Image (tube, rainbow, N blue to C red):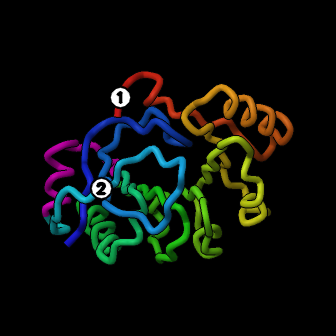
Amino acid sequence: MLGLAESFYSIQGEGTWTGTPAVFVRLAGCNLNCRFCDTDFSLRAFASVESVVARVSELGGSCPTVILTGGEPLAQRESSALIDALRADGRRVHVESNGSVAVDLPPDVWLTVSPKERLDPRMAARANEVKLIVDGRVPSEWLEAFAGRDVPTFLQPEGNKPANVALAIDAAKASPGRLRLGLQTHKFIGVR
């Protein structure tokens, strides 16, 4: 059984796929305790893999993109079975992870890694994009883990606060070939 926080149909508001319609499946729980976390990943229900796949179809119909997020979705033992079942249902699966839990993912699964307290080097090597949270400073200590790879690296200002935005913009301008500003556009337009 999977622990679920919520599921809903919306658009991706962050990163490379911004603006893309997607069904979000937020798995409950996280293995980290970040002080700036803005997500409620509290356990609200238990569900089988099959019922989650059915719910994705109910919410999004033929929408091809499903985003597994959390908390930390890969911390749940059945996350790999869910990924396999969604792919078998014809869905394109994206995973948003803090990168601390190493899981072998199929090559067609899009992996966003947003490191916080620790990072497994295998997940850094597998990342399709990186999201670094700017909260009073740019967490540049994580950049070395992704060095030598042409992976989009977004600086996301925590809470879209002006001081954090300014820090992110300055860092992106100082390293234009490597860093990008990443805003939570869904919050600006008032959608989930």
Does residue 145 belong to the magenta stretch?
Answer: no
At x 46% / y 63%, what residue is drawn? 108
Q: Magenta: predominant secondary structure element?
A: helix
Residue 190: x and y in percent read 38, 24
Q: Report the front residue among 20 and 88.
A: 20
At x 35% / y 63%, what residue is drawn? 29
Residue 58: x and y in percent read 14, 46
The circle on residue 191 is 1
Q: Secondary structure at mark 2?
A: loop
Name the amino acid, label 2: Ser
The circle on residue 42 is 2
Q: Secondary structure at mark 1?
A: loop
Residue 153: x and y in percent read 67, 48
Name the amino acid, label 1: Val
Does residue 62 belong to the magenta stretch?
Answer: yes
Q: Which residues are magenta?
A: 51-66
Eye-nearest disc, 1 or 2:
2
